[in-house]
Image (tube, rainbow, N blue to C red):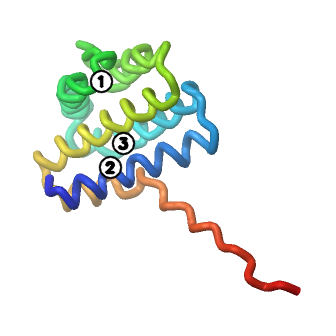
Amino acid sequence: MTTAAHSTAHESIHGTLTQRAGDTPDVAAVLEAVGSTWQTMAAQLEPVIGVRGVSVLLNRALYLTVKSYPWLTPTNAQEAADAMENIKLRFVGRTALEAAEGGCALLVTFTELLASLIGESLTERLLACVWLPPSPPFEQDTHHD
């Protein structure tokens, strides 16, 4: 994945998790955001690469992510849904910031692995519906009546 594509993927994933977790997220909100984002990703990809393909990519992403986030210990679960449930257990005792950073890193790594296998263009097309559009910037009222 190119540097620009990595940056775009990171921004999209980070923005989606931020919007889904809310303005003042706690660990539970972050977990819900990561989990719901993952479920949407898996639902988009399973018809294309299969449940096993999604599971293998998730486990590989975990293996790579654990280097920076050792508390995200890889799991040997066969189904991607089971793997994500096991991953959620690893977030217990983490701060909201740690959970957000680890969850974002895992999803970015997964997306990069997918892009390395099927190409950036197809990855973007398959996952475009997962990423929430960015919030519009706050506009100040310049009318002084």
Q: Amino acid at mark 2?
A: His
Residue at far left of view: 117
Mark sitting earlier along the chain (1/3)? 3
Q: Is residue 67 left or right of residue 31?
A: left
What residue is shown with label 2? 10
List x then y, in percent, for residue 73: 28, 15
Residue, x 30% and y 33% (percent of image)? Answer: 106
Q: Is residue 3 left or right of residue 128?
A: left
What residue is shown with label 3? 41
Q: Nearer the viewer, residue 60 or 43?
A: 60
Q: Amino acid at mark 1?
A: Tyr
In 3D space, how far apart are the residues under numbered discs 2 and 1 (Cα atoms)? Answer: 16 Å
Mark sitting earlier along the chain (2/3)? 2
Count of marks, rendered view? 3
Quadrant where the C terminus lies? bottom right
Residue, x 42% and y 53% (percent of image)? Answer: 131
Please rate how many residues cluster around mark 3, counting C-alpha atoms within 10 Å: few if below 14, some from 14 to 19, many from 20.
many
List x then y, in percent, for residue 115: 17, 49
Say what secondary structure mark 2 lies in: helix
Residue, x 52% and y 28% (percent of image)? Answer: 96
List x then y, in percent, for residue 25: 59, 35
Say what secondary structure mark 3 lies in: helix
Q: Is residue 49 left or right of residue 132?
A: left
Please rate how many residues cluster around mark 1, counting C-alpha atoms within 10 Å: few if below 14, some from 14 to 19, many from 20.
some
Marks 2, 3: nearer the viewer:
2
In 3D space, how far apart are the residues under numbered discs 1 and 3 (Cα atoms)? Answer: 21 Å
Please rate how many residues cluster around mark 2, counting C-alpha atoms within 10 Å: few if below 14, some from 14 to 19, many from 20.
some
Check whether the beta carbons of the residues at disc 2 and disc 3 lie within 8 A of each other. Answer: no
What residue is shown with label 1? 69
